[in-house]
Each structure stands twice: as C-alpha cells, then as structure tokens.
Image: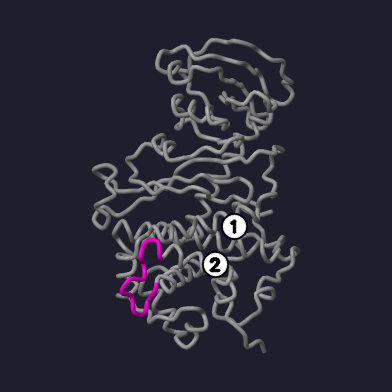
Amino acid sequence: MHTGRTLFAQVIRFLPRYEFQKCVARYDGDRRVRSFTCWDHLLCLVFAQLTCRESLRDIVACLRAVDGRLYHMGIRGTVSRSTLADANEARDWRIYADFAQVLIREARQLYLHEPFGVDVANTVYAFDSTIIDLCMSLFPWARYTHTQHAMKLHTLLDLRGNIPTFLRITPARLHDVHVLDDLTPEAGAFYVLDRGYLDFERLYRWTLQSAYFVTRARKNFRFDRVESRLVDKGTGVQCDQTIRLVWFYSSRGYPGDLRRIRYRDPETHQRFVFLTNNFTQPAAVIAELYRSRWQVELFFKWIKQHLRIKAFYGTSENAVKTQVWTAVCSYLLVAIARQRLKLGLNLNTMLQILSVSLFEKTPINRAFSLTDAINATRRDHNQLSLLDF
C-alpha cells in the first residue's frame, strides 16, 4: 500500500509557492497573522473548487473530517468557518489575482504549440464577457438594474490551450467596450471580438500598435469601396473588399482602410460580414478565426458548470473577487498538471477524479491512469469539448 503524500499534496506541488509568497509580500497579506496564512487560505479555496463545496460550513466540515491529514496536505493553520470568513473579507484579492498571472505565464508556455483548428502562426485571442447574477439583498454593491444585481467577468482567452490571459471583474452595468482601454495589444496577434466591441477609435489605436482584430459589422454600416479582390465562392466567401468609412465620427475615429469580408456558412447558410485590419491572410482564414471565437463562450459555460463562481462564500466585493480568482487558479492548476504529466484526459475527467480522491494516498500518475479507450467510451459528444484534445 502506498503510504506517501495525498493526491491533493501531489497536485498543489505544481503551485510555485515562492512566487505566491512574493505576491503576499507585495500586499502585506500575512501581516499580524499568527496561524491561518494566505497560503492556507489559498489551499482551502482550491480544495473547495476541486471538490465543489457549497458553503464555508461545507468546506470546514470536510476538512475537519480528515483533520489528521491537513498538515500533510499543506494546510498548517487551524481551519474554522469564522477564520475562513474573515480571510475572505480581509485578505486583499489582488494577492490571488497576481498569483493567477504567474500561473497564466506558465500555462501559456506549456500550451504554446497546441493547435486550435486554424492554421495561423500568430497568437490568437478571443475576447468576451459573461454576466453572473447575484442576490439583490446580499450584494448591494453590484447594482445592475432596479430588479437585478449582477457582475461581469471579462476574459481574454488565448485559443492555444484555452488559457485566460486577462480577466476583469466589473459591475454588470459597465459597457463591454470600455474594458478595451485596459487591454495592452500584442503586436502581430489576432483579437477576435463580437460586434459589441466595435468602437473604431479604440480599434484604430490597436492598428497603430500593429495588432490585428476580427469582428462583425453592424447592419447600418456605411462605407465606400476602394478595391475588390477575387474570391473562391466554394469556400463560402462571397466578397473580399478594401473599404473606407464614410460617416463623420467613425471615419474620424478610424481614418485608415479596412477589409470587409462577406461570408456564407456552407453548413448553416447564415450570412456574416466581417471587418478586419489584416490584409494578408486569406478571407476563408479570417472567417475561421471568427468561428473560433466560440471557444470563449464554451470557456464561460465550462467554468460555470465545473467551478464555484455562481454561488459565493462571502458577500463583499473582496470576497467575491477572491473566490473568482482562486477559481481561475484552480483551473490553471489542473491545466498545468495535465500538461506536466502528459495526460490524455480532458479537464472534466481530471476534476471528476480529483473530487473523489483528493484524500487518497495514491501516486498521481496512477490516479489519472485511465486509458484513452475508457475515456472515449464515456465521452458524450453533446457535451462541451473545451480542452478535449
């Protein structure tokens, strides 16, 4: 019988503790803390995410049931409901946000060469937001309308590995387009956006920084045609044009040329009109890039189904942001472990295994030793395929 470390202890070894302590020191997180440190706090919340705990009492009850193993799981402090509640209220959420950036950098390196369905050498990002509804009486700071309180999670997703590289948590009443001001565009990268982000002045600043965007045109879009290129209508592309804006404010915001592509999906027969500032990629590739934007929608659906970001352990803004960022850290932890261990399992299967065996003293490779054949027979093709490659 294996008498080594628990599976939880083996998983958290992929968390760089030295980097985490640098984040703690940056915000003085452990000041006047005697027992329950920021590291203990992080491990408790990661445990809650991996095992889908419903509340603080649920977390404490499960951890106290294995009180003799907590030290070997890496949790040194005494775990109680009041201690966890106070930590959620008082510990600066930016500690966990900064640590998530450390994990993002590591995960992006591991998934640097992963394919995502479109043959381009550039880095491709998809940017979108999702609304998370909140209780009106418990979250008065998140007022949306007079009948609804909610917040928005804005996410920039690197499609090579589906790694979230930028996240902002804002009140739901903030329009999505304002978050573009917080993004620093990467030269040579593609940014795939919904037409809700169509702001020509902001997008022109991206063009000046040599970043590419792909978005959809609005129905009342007005332009002058400068040039038309030959297209292969067998690919679904109906026209490929160089255009110039004609309306006063839009032409002043974007004084340069744009590329307009009209596309008809061969499968659904839907028609789309795309706008981009890239004039080198084939028109069919631009259409495929926009199709890949759906991955960010799948990402939102996946984390809402498998992580705890819809029901919260605290009601303050700090507690909510702490929980969301530790959920992101948990997602990245499993993604990093998957790549480090060279596993063929998808993230959903890994989470299912972890949720029932975190206290087991099983070698981590044996715990995830399901064969591809078994995994394939249990796969439901009607379910999400995020990170299932």
Q: Position of residue 25 (x, y in %)?
A: 40, 65
Vertical placement of 113 versus 11: above or below? Answer: above
Q: How many marks?
A: 2
In the drawing, what numbered circle is on residue 317? none
Q: Position of residue 182 (x, y in %)?
A: 42, 40
Sooner in the amino-acid sequence: mark 2 or mark 1: 2
Residue at 74% in and 67% down:
371
Residue at 61% in and 61% down:
336
Residue at 53% in and 60% down:
331
Q: Secondary structure at mark 2?
A: loop
Q: Position of residue 196 (x, y in %)?
A: 45, 32
Q: Nearer the viewer, residue 233 or 83?
A: 83
Quarter of the picture holding the N terminus = bottom right
In the drawing, what numbered circle is on residue 16? 2
Vertical placement of 13 versus 330: above or below? Answer: below
Indicate the quadrant where residue 293 lies: top right
Q: Is residue 103 left or right of residue 120?
A: left
| Local crowd size for mark 2, using a 10 Å CA cut-off: few (<14), some (14–19), many (≥20) | few
Q: Nearer the viewer, residue 167 or 59?
A: 167
- 124 inside magenta stretch: no
Give the main secondary structure, helix, strand or loop, of the magenta stretch. Answer: loop
Q: Position of residue 357 (x, y in %)?
A: 57, 76
Q: Are marks 2 and 1 in contact (CB under 8 Å)?
A: yes
> Which amino acid lies under the numbered mark 2 shown in the image of this protein?
Pro
User: Range of the magenta residues?
Assistant: 25-37
Q: Is residue 262 left or right of residue 303?
A: right
| Local crowd size for mark 1, using a 10 Å CA cut-off: few (<14), some (14–19), many (≥20) | some
- Rounded to the nearest whole Å, what is the CA distance between mark 2 and mark 1? 10 Å
> Which amino acid lies under the numbered mark 1 shown in the image of this protein?
Glu
In the drawing, what numbered circle is on residue 106? 1
- 34 inside magenta stretch: yes
Q: Nearer the viewer, residue 362 or 190?
A: 190
